[in-house]
Image (cartoon, rainbow, N blue to C red):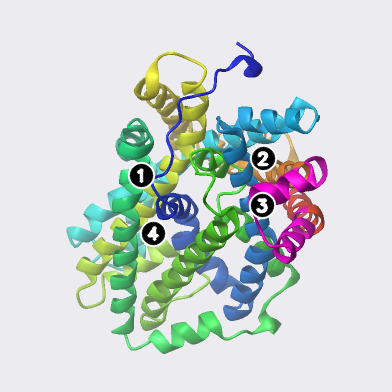
């Protein structure tokens, strides 16, 4: 069956604008906000990096986010079909759907190893609750993480648990699955985050953390830091993965895409900043290094929780928070491919979610083995750029550095240059001034910025 022969689906809608905002924010708020944002901020001078990041969210993230939601709402199908329909309505080549194909494939691949990392968060809930961090040295905490990575059986268990959690939600469909989950998980995530920030206030180093996050020091921000801010602003909003196209296909015509996109970006940024206010007081209170890199969450913070009053309780809450953030993102990563398959076969929503989830899980097993049994196996090691990269590393590299920016670039070019301007203005229902700002950003600024990120990622 060709895409053009796919029948229009019987499609539900989000019950409210808030439901869509929670779902889109749940997708955007993931490990990138709570894990990556604090440490890249710490590594690039704090407040100056935050200001550049916010600028990039405004001029790159929001315009492309609006474009992706617009494509989904206009097409009312899975992302590939929605892209094709919009191209046909504008007398353009159906090959523009390549953008959605790349994005959906990227979402599938990312979920396969994202689930492994989500499993780490799930396993650390038990460690924190049982007091395994209490009184431990840095070497012992590092050994705990090393032991986890070295044990394929334990990694497989937690990877399986995480994937089952994701499939259970997506299999239930829009109202009973996606919407119900985000209506519970997102408020819970915010409460946990605020409680953790409150704990940070008791450390005596909260003002130091706030100063670090919000006092700009541009002397500490290199050109590389600007490019990292540019890239992170793009990736944190789940752009280039066809997710917002899938979620947009359930959005009512009466909902303002512009206001909704801005709200999603604001909530996503607030979570990232709150994560910094939760993490850095603990870091400073224990004389730890704020630019500790990816190990900040799974090695540095457990050391801090193990030496602080009520550290086991708040360590447990923190890793529950991390799991919830990963879960909401995992749900969104599974949705586009499940939606696509559901429109093409007759096995129903549950069968499609299980099948896609199982395929994702199976690919994740390769990532697990690359952390231990296959750690010496570098599939593309014959090329200097990929020397020493495991399967896990390669999947991360190709999705983050090639597939996502390429998908986002194609989407921006398509909407900015190949879709009728009047149709865009009608669909977005913006004021003349607001539309002019968005239109110039999506035509000129966003594509150039994404292209810069793309070239930088490929040449560094």
Residue 403 - label = 2
Q: Mark 3 points at which residue?
A: 64
Choose top left, top right, bottom left or bottom right for residue 311.
bottom left
Earlier residue among tags 1 and 3: 3
Earlier residue among tags 1 and 2: 1
Q: Mark 4 points at which residue?
A: 298
Q: How crowded is mark 4: few (under 14 residues within 10 Å), some or many (20 or more)?
A: some
Q: Distance between the residues labelled 1 and 3?
A: 23 Å
Instruction: Give the x, y percent position of residue 53.
Output: 63, 68
Residue at 26% in and 75% down:
307
* 417 part of magenta stretch: yes
178 displayed left or right of 11: left
Q: Is mark 2 on a helix, strand or loop?
A: helix
Q: Name the residue under label 1.
A: 179
Q: Residues within 10 Å of mark 3 (few under 14, many from 20)?
A: many
Q: Residue 381, relative to residue 288: is it above or below?
A: above
Magenta-highlighted residues: 415-442
Earlier residue among tags 2 and 3: 3
Q: Main secondary structure of the magenta part?
A: helix
Q: Nearer the viewer, mark 2 or mark 3?
A: 3
- Disc 1, disc 4: CB below 8 Å? no
Q: Which of marks 1 and 2 is in front?
A: 1
Q: What element carries label 4?
A: helix
């Amino acid at each position: 069956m060709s895409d053009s022969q796919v029948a229009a689906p019987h499609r539900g809608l989000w019950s409210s604008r808030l439901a869509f905002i929670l779902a889109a924010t749940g997708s955007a708020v993931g490990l990138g906000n709570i894990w990556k944002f604090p440490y890249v901020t710490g590594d690039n001078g704090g407040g100056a990096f935050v200001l550049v990041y916010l600028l990039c969210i405004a001029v790159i993230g929001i315009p492309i986010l609006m474009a992706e939601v617009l494509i989904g709402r206009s097409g009312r199908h899975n992302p590939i079909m929605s892209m094709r329909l919009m191209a046909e309505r504008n007398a353009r080549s159906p090959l523009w759907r390549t953008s959605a194909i790349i994005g959906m494939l990227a979402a599938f691949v990312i979920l396969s190893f994202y689930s492994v990392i989500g499993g780490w968060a799930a396993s650390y809930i038990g460690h924190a609750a049982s007091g395994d961090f209490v009184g431990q040295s840095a070497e012992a905490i590092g050994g705990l993480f090393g032991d986890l990575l070295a044990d394929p059986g334990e990694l497989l268990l937690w990877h399986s648990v995480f994937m089952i959690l994701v499939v259970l939600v997506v299999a239930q469909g829009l109202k009973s699955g996606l919407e119900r989950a985000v209506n519970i998980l997102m408020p819970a995530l915010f409460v946990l985050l605020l409680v953790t920030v409150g704990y940070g206030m008791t450390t005596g180093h909260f003002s130091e953390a706030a100063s670090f996050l919000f006092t700009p020091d541009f002397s500490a921000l290199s050109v590389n830091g600007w490019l990292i801010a540019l890239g992170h602003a793009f990736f944190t909003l789940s752009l280039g993965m066809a997710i917002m196209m899938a979620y947009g296909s359930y959005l009512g015509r009466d909902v303002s895409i512009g206001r909704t996109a801005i709200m999603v970006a604001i909530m996503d940024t607030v979570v990232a900043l709150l994560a910094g206010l939760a993490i850095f007081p603990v870091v400073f209170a224990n004389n730890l290094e704020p630019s500790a890199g990816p190990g900040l969450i799974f090695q540095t913070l457990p050391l801090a929780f193990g030496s602080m009053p009520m550290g086991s309780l708040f360590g447990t809450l923190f890793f529950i928070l991390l799991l919830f953030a990963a879960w909401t993102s995992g749900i969104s990563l599974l949705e586009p491919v499940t939606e696509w398959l559901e429109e093409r076969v007759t096995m129903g929503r549950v069968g499609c979610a299980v099948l896609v989830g199982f395929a994702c899980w199976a690919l994740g097993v390769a990532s697990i083995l690359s952390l231990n049994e296959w750690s010496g196996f570098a599939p593309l090691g014959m090329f200097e750029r990929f020397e020493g990269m495991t399967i896990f590393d390669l999947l991360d590299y190709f999705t983050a550095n090639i597939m996502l920016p390429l998908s986002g670039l194609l989407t921006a070019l398509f909407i900015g240059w190949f879709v009728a301007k009047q149709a865009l203005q009608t669909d977005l229902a913006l004021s003349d001034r607001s539309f002019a700002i968005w239109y110039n950003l999506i035509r000129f600024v966003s594509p150039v910025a994404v292209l810069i990120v793309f070239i930088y990622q490929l040449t560094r």
